[in-house]
Amino acid sequence: MYEFVELETTVRIPPSHFTSDVEEAVLKALENDVEGKLFKEDDSGEPVGFVVLVDEILDIEHEGVFPGDGAAYHRVRFRALVFRPEEREVTVGEVTRVKEYGAFVRLGPLDGLLHVSQILDEYMYYDGAREALVGEETGRELKKGDIIKVMIIGVSLNEERPRESKIALTVKKPGLGKPEWWE
Amino acid sequence: MERMEELTRFEVTRILGARALQISMGSPVMVEVEEGESPLEIAKKEFERGVIPVVVIRER
């Protein structure tokens, strides 16, 4: 879920932020670029995860000033606390929104989607007035604010459009779901 | 800036140009500035005084 990871990226410091303490300027620029966002290590496929916090700078390599841009570029190696959802991970979350097609569950910095077909072994209908999904046979319901144990079954992180990232969830395994559903 | 005299004219141009660009983009300045001085004039003044915070790295 949460891991300390060593990452590397290039940081750009505009002249307006020049200061006598280079390390401090680099740290500030790094935090600004990287914290609170999905991080991808230089166009290499899937994002590594969601950076919660920059922990420590390990190394800085000063790259220089390039023609046409007055800014200073630095290559930074750093350790960061990263939120990394993985398939088959079991975690607990709170239901934030319920729609006809499923429920959104807050897993941490990101939300996952629990599709209606992945909740109970029965037809669930959507109660719009109460914003809940209700099982037709058992009457079990899932609504906003419920705490629920889920398993991640699919991860697709979109760096350019984080809102379109998809974390697919299920509760159709023993021990998952709402506590009151367990026998 | 110990070997300023050994800089080629191209390096000098590049340094002055880059420094002037930085100044125009809001960089802190290492010399006192008079009213109406252009970024390039400021860069030249810094260069003459040897206080431009730029190092030329030559790959040979």
Image (cartoon, coloured by chain):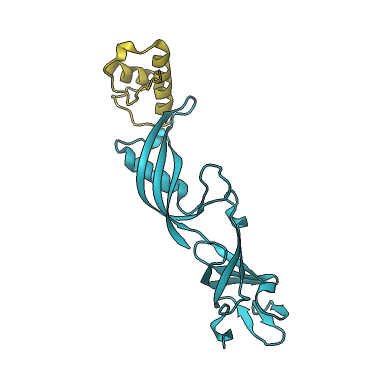
Chain colours: A cyan, B yellow
Q: Position of residue B20 (x, y in %)?
A: 41, 23
- A94, above or below A14, in the image: below
Q: Quadrant of residue B39?
A: top left
Q: Position of residue A21 (x, y in %)?
A: 30, 38
Query: With B19 as the anchor, is A67 left or right in this view?
Result: right
Q: Nearer the viewer, residue B44 or A82?
A: A82
- A77, above or below A170, in the image: above
- A140, above or below A52, in the image: below
Q: Residue at x 29, y 24 (%)?
A: B31
Q: Residue at x 29, y 15 (%)?
A: B3
Q: Position of residue A55 (x, y in %)?
A: 37, 53
Q: Residue at x 49, y 25 (%)?
A: A68
Q: Nearer the viewer, residue A88 or B45?
A: A88
Q: How many marks overall?
A: 0
Quadrant of the drawing holding the C terminus of chain A: bottom right
Q: Position of residue A40 (x, y in %)?
A: 52, 47
Q: Quadrant of residue A150?
A: bottom right
